[in-house]
Image: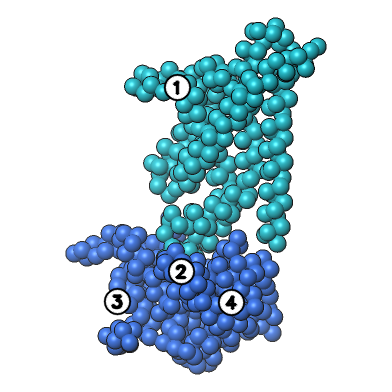
Chain colours: A cyan, B blue
Amino acid sequence: MDFLGVITSHYNAFLVGAAMTAVVSAVSIALGMILGLWLAFGLISRNRPLRRASAVYRSAWRGTPILVQLLIVFYLLPEIGLDVPPVAAAIIALTMNTAAFQAEIFRGGLLTIPSGQVEAARMLGIRVLRIRVRILIPQMMRLVLPALINETISILKNSSLISVIAVTELMRTSQQVVSVTYRPLETYMIAAVVYLAMNLVLARAGAWFERRHALAAR
Amino acid sequence: MSEEAESGTMEGKPVVLVEGLHKRFGATHVLKGIDLAVEKSQVVCVIGPSGSGKSTLLRCMAFLDRYDEGRVFIENRLLGYRETDGELTRDSERNIDSVRSVIGMVFQHYNLWPHMTALGNVTEALRVVRKLGRREAEHIGMEMLGKVGLNDKAHDHPARLSGGQQQRTAIARALAIRPHVMFFDEPTSALDPELVGEVLQVMQELASEGMTMVVVTHEMGFAAHVADEVVFMDDGEVVERGSPDDIFKRPRSDRLREFLDTWRSRAI
Ligand SMILES: Nc1ncnc2c1ncn2[C@@H]1O[C@H](COP(=O)(O)OP(=O)(O)O)[C@@H](O)[C@H]1O
Ligand SMILES: [Mg+2]
């Protein structure tokens, strides 16, 4: 075992790879949140076609493997005239995937908010978008924070799959390190520790937010 | 000044006019042709057994529920629909908002927004609908909270307030947009008995200031004391209406007598 040797000789590569993993995941989660919010309101809409379309989207993206989604997006984009770098394809695929999962999380949270709160707002002349932004989303976010952290952790781990379309994130970096050091076990264990560390930070941040909100609500 | 001019043209015309209102939920016929007129500064109390359609009536009068037949006019403007050649088509959200902007509504379960302070609840519409600045909105907000006796609770969240204080906050919130008429749907039914009085007192003050009010209530004492007209509903119909004395001392129908008997035996 030569962990130290592998780390010291490829320290920078691991760092850059981890940064790529973090950025792709963070951007996908953030964009997925915007899409997921629209989708969640679609799922609970009174407009039947909109509700149906939202449900179809959600089922399709939750019901197929991320790896398949990733490859379809990667090969489809050039087909429709969009020549984007692999990292963009990766972000699009992860965004569209997490949007489906986040929408389902948000939908659950929204359903727990009594409809009377919305009726009171409507009686005061507050418009739909304002009601969502000022009344529904803030309450819902507190409720779903733990689930949202789980989803973020899941995307961070699943982002390792984007190595197959040649995005040099932590997983692909590790493969490259293996190909020059011939030390697969040490290399992948280092990668595992880096993933774990990032996820522990996330879990900690989530717990901190939850505590803070629990205090604020009192 | 302009408000006076406006009310001058309103002279004699009811603030709320309901004509032949019908409402169905699927196969259940909940409102079976309701007529109601509420004049300026009048207090109309609606009483009746549970399930008789009182809440549905109030909700249709605010277009929180769509009505199926008939008309609701708020200050002479048709609410919820546009009428062309006798045909009703649903109005735009903008027009609906505009017609009901003169209605303040108070619900049985307060429906406060729990993530905002009492003051935040009261100022929200002033900020996002009336587009007032923070200082101006909070000035009006404090004035409204003062009106319901809650100045010292302005910065508390609803969870820290008693039921009576929450309902008074909800009344202040509705008053902030300066409504011309207030709808109350059993505002004290969710309260512990010892907290009912403080809410009724605020409502009585409003009435004596000349606020036009429609109050669905089981508080017969309040109805007898404050109402100009009492409307008794049963099974989706107005069975009897009249002055509090007519209704409580000289009931004409069996259904009203029975309802009052049940209520009296429960009150003892
Ligand atoms: N959203 C709804 N869907 C179906 N039925 C309803 C709905 N709201 C009320 N009802 C029915 O309408 C009738 C009148 O209800 P409601 O107006 O709440 O009566 P009240 O306020 O006098 O107790 C009841 O039979 C109730 O079950
Ligand atoms: Mg009711």
Q: Residues within 10 Å of mark 4 (few under 14, many from 20)?
A: many
Task: Say above or below: B210 vs B30.
Answer: below
Does the CB distance between marks 1 and 2 fall below 8 Å? no
State which quarter of the image contains the N terminus of chain B.
bottom left
> How far apart are the alpha carbons under marks 1 and 2?
46 Å
Can see residue A199?
Answer: yes
Q: Which residue is mark 1?
A: A85
- Circle 2 packing at 10 Å, graded few (<14), some (14-19), many (20+), is few
The alpha-carbon separation of the residues under discs 3 and 2 comes to 32 Å
> Residue B18 appears at what percent x and percent y?
35, 75
* Subunit of label 3: B
Q: Amino acid at mark 2?
A: Gly
**Above or below B242: residue B97:** above
Decide which of tag 3 and tag 2 comes sooner along the chain: 3
Residue indicated by mark 2: B133
The amino acid pointed to by label 3 is: Asn
Q: Which residue is mark 4?
A: B168
